[in-house]
Amino acid sequence: MALIVQKYGGTSVGTVERIQAVAQRIQATVAAGHQAVVVVSAMGKTTDGLVKLAGEITSQPSRREMDMLLSTGEQVSIALLSMALQALGQDAISLTGAQVGIITEAEHSRARILNIKTDRLERHLSEGKVIVVAGFQGISETVDLEITTLGRGGSDTSAVALAAALHADLCEIYTDVPGILTTDPRLVPEAQLMAEITSDEMLELASLGAKVLHPRAVEIARNYGVTLVVRSSWTDEPGTRVISPQPHGRPLEGLELAHPVDAVEFDPDQTKVAFLRIPDRPGIAAHLFGELATQNLNVDLIIQSIHEGNTNDIAFTLVKANLAQAEMVAAALAPALRTNPSDTSQAEVMVDGHTAKISIAGAGMIGRPGVAAKMFSALATAGINIQLISTSEVKVSCTLDAAAGDRAIALLCEAFGVTSSPVMPTPLAPDGADRPTPVVRGAALDSQQAQVGLRQVPDRPGMAAKIFERLASHGVSVDMIIQSQRCHRVKGEPSRDIAFTVALADASTAENLMQAMAQELGFGEVVVNRAIAKVSVVGMGMMHYPGVAARMFQALSDEHINLQMIATSEIKISCVVAESEGIRALQAVHQAFDLAATRSSHTDSSGQPPEHRVGR
Ligand code: ASP
Ligand code: MG
């Protein structure tokens, strides 16, 4: 007998007939000898309808009353589903979040779960009942008892949190799609269902997967080792398994971390190589990283910021052991990028062997302004200068002078209340199965962003902190942040360019704020580009195999697509391209990594994952 938590989304319970079909599925689970706790969303588009109603009364409803309103949607569906089960002769009881004891912080409309009381659930389970729990809601006990909601799409999070609290054997998310696909099928018809994906990869694919699976749910699954499956309510297909590492006995108190960062990672062993003033045209990055791949050099971070005139700077890091070799390759490449090979005012290479990388990681930073700013300001208060910045959905990485490393770790652990830093994930499937994970698992496109570039920001501690604090204090959430290697002396002082992307809706606010700051902080032009798209690839395997970036850049170069910015994390590479080229870029990249062909088998006749055969 297993304890299974099942979650059914709005479309799965959208009509009476569907509610009855869901009841039958649950009954079959019980008939197979299992116990079931079922979480449901509001029927169909109920929540949207309620939001619209509120909007007809006021353009600024209070967050408390919105929670009061929206939480009713789920209360309807739990009662109906429970009745449907009872009508089938299956003993069942519906419970709101408050009745269960899903305790959250007192943050209306975006509360995080702090704890789940399990006594009542356990009692009803032992009575042989199916428990139907309202998703997306909880209760805060801080002062008064207050109904809270977890934020749109939060029922997934309720389900996984319940599975963690009950130590359930399995959490199944039933939805109207067959599972998680390698990319958005509306843009790339060849997109394939993934048989499995790791939770870390899923988090980095948040912009692709968020509609299917709430990122906070993925984070809980990862932290508590919940076995999670996303599958269709209409079929018996197995869907996609989201694999998490073995749990390490994390306490259930503070279940969803109230703080947004859950790890500080440090890599003392990095070398930074920068190509300065290289031509800004398609194919250059592909060429550079192609050469590095041919030499079997595994590149870690890659950073390219906004161009300047018709040149660009690209910096990357790799392990120190590769320093000498990288230096040779880089020095050999540079002259070929000059119109006059001996003119070092063109394409120049800089190598720095005393660099360390420090990162903060956590799904809680998605959509929460101010996390990156807090990191930068913690470093600034200690006078630590940030060299490069590269971010992904769930990670902010900075390179620093290696000598400042220990101080930086202590500061960040303190600032974010993190006590331990996890070991890096392994390339093997975390469930212990002895097979390599694919180099690239999926690809995503985000066209709803604008790019903001700040030229010639003084290169001294505290600048990035001030800039991103200002944005955060105005509620502007920043997605990618890139600080490049480009250096200029302005009135004798070195400067660097900083670029970032924000949601399109925030572009004007960001532009105005930055324009106002330019004077104050003494930086140059503010360049805003709304016509951009971000294309990304994600895969755990890329940590361990050279050539992934080169292959992505080559695919884009073959389509004559220019790369406007590049930022990476260990398991993700993102490129900003012109918006008009976004879909073509996604298609090219999806194809380049054979994603349409990796459906269920990761190996071909040579026994090798297909991705591993191609050198970079
Ligand atoms: N009903 C809520 C929403 O539409 C929660 C959910 O369905 O996950 O956002
Ligand atoms: Mg959903």
Image: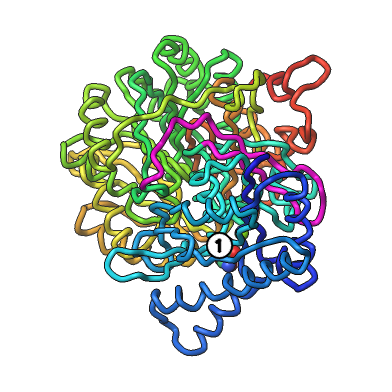
**Residue at point 59% right, 66% down?**
94
Q: Is residue 49 above or below residue 276?
A: below
Would you say the magenta stretch is mainly helix, strand or loop?
A: loop
Residue 207 rendering spot, x and y as whole percentages: 57, 51
Q: How far across and down, in percent of the image, does residue 271 sit? A: 38, 20
Q: Which residues are magenta?
A: 225-253
**Viewer-nearest residue: 327 or 336:** 327
Q: Where is ligand 1, by quadrant?
A: bottom right
Relative depth, front residue between 102 and 229: 102
Whether the magenta-drawn stretch holds residue 572 is answered as no
| Snapshot quadrant of residue 362 | top left
Q: Examine the structure image and report whether residue 250 is included in the region drawn in magenta.
A: yes
According to the picture, the residue beneath numbered tag 1 turns out to be 135
Q: Is residue 250 above or below residue 447?
A: above
Residue at the image position 32 percent from the left and 24 percent from the top: 356
Q: Residue 228: x and y, percent? A: 62, 42
367 vs 93, left or right, is left
Disc 1 Cβ-to-ligand 1 distance below 8 Å: yes
Extreme residue in the bottom direction: 57
Name the side, left or right, on which 181 lies relative to 325.
right
Instruction: Tell me: residue 613, above or below residue 560.
Output: above
Report whether 59 appears left or right of 281. left
The foreground one among 59 and 592 is: 59
Q: Is residue 547 visible?
A: no
Q: Inspect the image, locate mark 1, and give the three-letter code of the amino acid beneath it.
A: Gly
State which quarter of the image contains the C terminus: top right
- Give the structural element (helix, strand or loop) at label 1: loop
- Residue at image position (76%, 63%) is 89
